[in-house]
Image (cartoon, grey):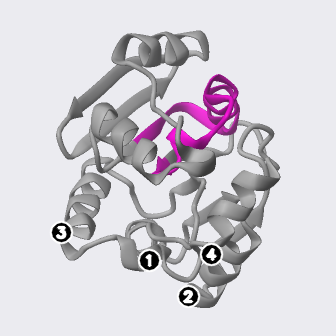
Amino acid sequence: MNHRKEYFESFADEWDKMFTAEDLEVLAFLIDSFKIRDGFRVADLGCGTGVLFDLLRRKVGASGLIVGVDFSPRMLSKAKTNFPFSNIIAIDGDVEALPLRSDYFDIAISFAAFAHFPNQALVIEEASRILKKGGTFNVIHLMSSRELAEHHIKAGGPVAHDVVPTVEKMKDLFSCCDFNNVKINDHPGLYLAIGTKG
């Protein structure tokens, strides 16, 4: 785990610059499609430097709450500096054992992070635990599963073998954790998996 943490710590200063204006447009469209309302509580799992925070903040309003969880102190430090708002909290924590309340959040999102979680089944289980009934867990990568696998092989190092599950495997993982109405899009430029807590 230390090698993995060191790897992501090394990208903290450049992380925000890796996302293009087009990427941010796609993310804005996706966030819109999640129908996040004023007052919602959102958990951002593997939040990094808070790439989604501004988009989410506009949706939840002053009465809402955004809690980001990440294991990279340098990424979190940047997130806190960039978004010094009282209703945005960035926590140093393990997404496989979230330091968050059960049945509390309206929506959980993992952007550009899920492929890097060693125990993906446990992360989905934890997402189910923290979500209210009817809440959704949304897994987003701006590449298809194949593109992502190839990208990580080229990157090498600790992320060389990081992948997202196949469509069937992902459906099984969601179903085992009390998610239903599972929808998965896996095509060039996007991997999006959404499950609704039953």
Q: Which residue is mark 1?
A: 16
Q: Mark 2: which amino acid?
A: Asn
Q: Residue at x 45, y 66 (%)?
A: 60
Q: CA distance from mark 4 to mark 3?
A: 27 Å
Q: Nearer the viewer, mark 4 or mark 3?
A: 3
Looking at the image, residue 178 sits to the left or right of residue 5; the answer is left
* Residue bearing the label numbered 4: 87
Q: Nearer the viewer, mark 1 or mark 2?
A: 1
Identify which amino acid the numbered label 1 is placed on. Asp
Q: Secondary structure at mark 1?
A: helix
Instruction: State which quadrant residue 82 falls in.
Output: bottom right
- Residue 86: numbered disc: none
Give the number of marks: 4
Q: What amino acid type is highlighted by mark number 4?
A: Asn
- Disc on the earlier residue, 1 or 2: 1
Image point (30%, 26%), residue name: 184
Cα separation, mark 1 vs mark 4, equals: 21 Å
Residue 71 appearing in the image = no
Q: Secondary structure at mark 4?
A: loop
